[in-house]
C-alpha cells in the first residue's frame, strides 16, 4: 500500500489558489481546524468553499482573505451567533454566496461522486434559491409523468478536507460510532483530492480490529496528517466537546477587522506546530475542560 | 405525572416562553415523528413536554441524528452531543437523515424559526435587503428549511419577536416555500403540506383554507388585537365571532418545564430582545 502520511505543510501545499475546497463542518462541530489554520498560514487565495453548515472556520477563512465564494446551506455558530467577518465580507461583496439547501447540496455532490450530470431533489422547489442559481439548478419534467423535480448539477470539488478519529499511514480512515457528521459521507467521494487530519495515526493492525469503523479506504485518500485535538475549538464526539470560552473570545473581537486580524495572528500564524497551538489555547487545562463537555454560558 | 397535568389549574405566574412551549407541545400527538435543528430551544422544550405529558409516544429525532434521546435537561446547544444523550439509534445526519425526511411517510411535522415570515407563510433566513449579492444583512442561510418547505411537511413556525420587521407583507427572499402567493400556488407545483400554525410571543395564527392568508386564531392573555395588528406588517385575517384567547399553561406544565426540562432557562435565550 502507498504511504500517505505527511505533514500539515505538505498536505496543504496540495491545495492550489483558486481551488474549490469542500470543508467538513457544522455550526460548532467537527471542522478540520488544523488543516484550516494551515490554509491561512500558507496564505491561500481565491478559494471557493463548499460547506453544509459553516462555523468559526468559515469566519477565519473570510477574515484572512482566503475565500472569495461559498457554496453552502448556512453559516452560523449557533449559540455564538452569526459569523461576523464572513457576514461583513458578504455584505461588502468580497465573498459571493451560492446558497443551496441541504438536499440540493447532497444531490450536487452525489452527482459528482457518481459521475452523473445531475441528480434531482424535491427540496427547494418554490423557493428563491432556484432563480438565484440558474447555471446549476433547473426544473425538470418527470419523464415518468409526475410533477417536475429540481435537477441539481454535479459538483466536483478540487479538494475535500476531513477530520477523523484515527487513520493508518496508508490513509485508511476510521470514525468512532457517533452521530456521523454529514460531510464525511459524500464530500470525499465527490472531490478530486482528499486530505484528512486524524486524532491519531495507528498501526493498520489496530484498524483491522474494527473494519466496520473504517469509513474511507486508503486508495481514496491523498494525504493524512496526525493532528491531535485537530477539531478544536469545534466538538469532536465522543472525544471532546466544543470550546465555548474560545468561541466567546472570538465573538468578542470578530466584529472588528483589526482585532480579528490580531486574534488570527496570535492563534493561527504564530504557533508553528499543533503542540504549540494547544499550549496557546490553554494547554492541558483546556483539554480537560473540553473533554468533559463543560459548557460556559 | 402524566395524568395530573391535565386537571392542573391554569398557571398564574407563567411567562410567554412557557406559553409558546405549551401551545407548540399541543400540536404534537402520540405516533407523530419530529426532529429539530440548531438554536431550537422552544421546539425542543415543546417536544420534551409533550413526551412527559400527553404524547409519551411522540418520536423525536434530536439534532437530525439521535433517535429517542434522554437528555437530563436542555443544554446550551440543540445541535451538540449533550442533547442526543442516551439515544437508541444514531442516524447519519445528512444523507440518511434526508432518506427519512424526504420520504413523505416519516417525520411529518417540523418547527421552523426564521428572521422574516410573510402573510402566506413564506420564510426568509437568507438575506435582508433587495440585492442578494450585496445584502443589508447576511443571515445564516436556508440550511434545511428550503427542503422542509417543499417536501410535504406540516410546518409550525415559532417567532419570539412578533414585530413589523419579522412579520412582513413579502419576504425579501423565499428561503422556504410557504403558500407562495396564496391560493393553490403550492398544489400547482406539486407540493404537499405547508405552514399550519404560527406561534408568536403575542398570538397564535393559522392560514385561511382557500386564500392561504395568515389569520389570527387566538391572542395571548394580556394582549390586545390592536397590539397584534400594530406588530404585524400586513393585514391579518380575523377569526369569525369573538376573539379567542390562547389557553394559558397549567401549573403542572410550568412546573415540568422549569424543574425537569429546562432548569437552566435556555428557552429564554430566544427572548433576549425583551430584557
Image: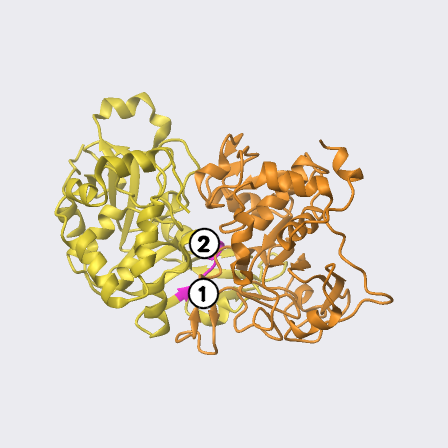
Q: Which mark is residue B139?
A: 1
Q: Which tag is nearer the camera, tag 2 or tag 1?
A: 1
Quadrant in which residue B191 is drawn: bottom right
Q: Residue A238: image x %, image y %?
A: 38, 33
Is A60 situated above or below A213?
below
Compared across the picture, whether B89 is left or right of A253 comes to right
Q: Residue A279: image x %, image y %?
A: 18, 41
> Which one is in front, A67 or B199?
B199
Compared across the picture, whether A19 is left or right of B125 comes to left
Which chain is indicated by disc 1? B
Quadrant in which residue A292 is drawn: top left
The shade of chain A is: yellow
> Which one is in front, A154 or A63?
A63
> Which one is in front, B143 or B22?
B22
- The extreme right residue here reads B241
Secondary structure at badge 2 equals: helix
- The extreme front residue here reads B13
- Around disc 2, counting alpha carbons within 10 Å, would you say few (fewer than 14), some (14 to 19), or many (20 or more)? many
- The chain coloured orange is B
- Residue at the disc numbered 2: A107
Which chain is indicated by disc 2? A
Amino acid at each position: 500500500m502507498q504511504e500517505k502520511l505527511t505533514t500539515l505543510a505538505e498536505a496543504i501545499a496540495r491545495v492550489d489558489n483558486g481551488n474549490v475546497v469542500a470543508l467538513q463542518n457544522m455550526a460548532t462541530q467537527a471542522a478540520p481546524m488544523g488543516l484550516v489554520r494551515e490554509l491561512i498560514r500558507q496564505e491561500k487565495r481565491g478559494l471557493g468553499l463548499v460547506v453544509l453548515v459553516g462555523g468559526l472556520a468559515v469566519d477565519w477563512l473570510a477574515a484572512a482573505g482566503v475565500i472569495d465564494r461559498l457554496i453552502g446551506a448556512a453559516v452560523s455558530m449557533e449559540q455564538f451567533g452569526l459569523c461576523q467577518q464572513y457576514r461583513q465580507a458578504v455584505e461588502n461583496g468580497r465573498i459571493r454566496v451560492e446558497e443551496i439547501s441541504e438536499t440540493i447540496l447532497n444531490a450536487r455532490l452525489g452527482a459528482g461522486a457518481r459521475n452523473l450530470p445531475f441528480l434531482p431533489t424535491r427540496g427547494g422547489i418554490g423557493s428563491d434559491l432556484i432563480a438565484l442559481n440558474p447555471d446549476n439548478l433547473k426544473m425538470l419534467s418527470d419523464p415518468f409523468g409526475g410533477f417536475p423535480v429540481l435537477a441539481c448539477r454535479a459538483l466536483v470539488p478540487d479538494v475535500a478536507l476531513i477530520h477523523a478519529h484515527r487513520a493508518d499511514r496508508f490513509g485508511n480512515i476510521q470514525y468512532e460510532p457517533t452521530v456521523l457528521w454529514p460531510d464525511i459521507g459524500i464530500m470525499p467521494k465527490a472531490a478530486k483530492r482528499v486530505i484528512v487530519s486524524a486524532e491519531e495515526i495507528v498501526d493498520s493492525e489496530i484498524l483491522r480490529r474494527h473494519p466496520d469503523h473504517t469509513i474511507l479506504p486508503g486508495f481514496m485518500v491523498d494525504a493524512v496528517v496526525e493532528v491531535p485535538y485537530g477539531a478544536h475549538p469545534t466538538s469532536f464526539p465522543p472525544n471532546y466537546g466544543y470550546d465555548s470560552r474560545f468561541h466567546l473570545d472570538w465573538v468578542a473581537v470578530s466584529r472588528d477587522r483589526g482585532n480579528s486580524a490580531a486574534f488570527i495572528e496570535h492563534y493561527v500564524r504564530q504557533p508553528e506546530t499543533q503542540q504549540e497551538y494547544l499550549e496557546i489555547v490553554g494547554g492541558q487545562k483546556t483539554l480537560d475542560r473540553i473533554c468533559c463537555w463543560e459548557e460556559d454560558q | 405525572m402524566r395524568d395530573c397535568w391535565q386537571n392542573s389549574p391554569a398557571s398564574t405566574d407563567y411567562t410567554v416562553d412557557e406559553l409558546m412551549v405549551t401551545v407548540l407541545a399541543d400540536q404534537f400527538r402520540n405516533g407523530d415523528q419530529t426532529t429539530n435543528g440548531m438554536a431550537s430551544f422552544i421546539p425542543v422544550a415543546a417536544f420534551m413536554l409533550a413526551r412527559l405529558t400527553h404524547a409519551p409516544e411522540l418520536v423525536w429525532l434530536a439534532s437530525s441524528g439521535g433517535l429517542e434521546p434522554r437528555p437530563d435537561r436542555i443544554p446550551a446547544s440543540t445541535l451538540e452531543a449533550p442533547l442526543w444523550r442516551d439515544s437508541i439509534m444514531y442516524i447519519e445526519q445528512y444523507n440518511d437523515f434526508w432518506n427519512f425526511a424526504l420520504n413523505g411517510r416519516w417525520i411529518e411535522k417540523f418547527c421552523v424559526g426564521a428572521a422574516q415570515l410573510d402573510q402566506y407563510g413564506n420564510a426568509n433566513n437568507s438575506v435582508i435587503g433587495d440585492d442578494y449579492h450585496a445584502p443589508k444583512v447576511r443571515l445564516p442561510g436556508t440550511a434545511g428549511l428550503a427542503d422542509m418547505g417543499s417536501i410535504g411537511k406540516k410546518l409550525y413556525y415559532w417567532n419570539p419577536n412578533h414585530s413589523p420587521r419579522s412579520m412582513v407583507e413579502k419576504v425579501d427572499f423565499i428561503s422556504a416555500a410557504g403558500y407562495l402567493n396564496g391560493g393553490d400556488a403550492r398544489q400547482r407545483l406539486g407540493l404537499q403540506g405547508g405552514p399550519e400554525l404560527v406561534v408568536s410571543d403575542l398570538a397564535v395564527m393559522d392560514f385561511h383554507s382557500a386564500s392561504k392568508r395568515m389569520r389570527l386564531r387566538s391572542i395571548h392573555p394580556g394582549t390586545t388585537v390592536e397590539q397584534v395588528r400594530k406588530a404585524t406588517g400586513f393585514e391579518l385575517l380575523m377569526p369569525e365571532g369573538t376573539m379567542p384567547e390562547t389557553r394559558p399553561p397549567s401549573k403542572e406544565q410550568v412546573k415540568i418545564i422549569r424543574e425537569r426540562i429546562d432548569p437552566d432557562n435556555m428557552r429564554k435565550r430566544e427572548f433576549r430582545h425583551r430584557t
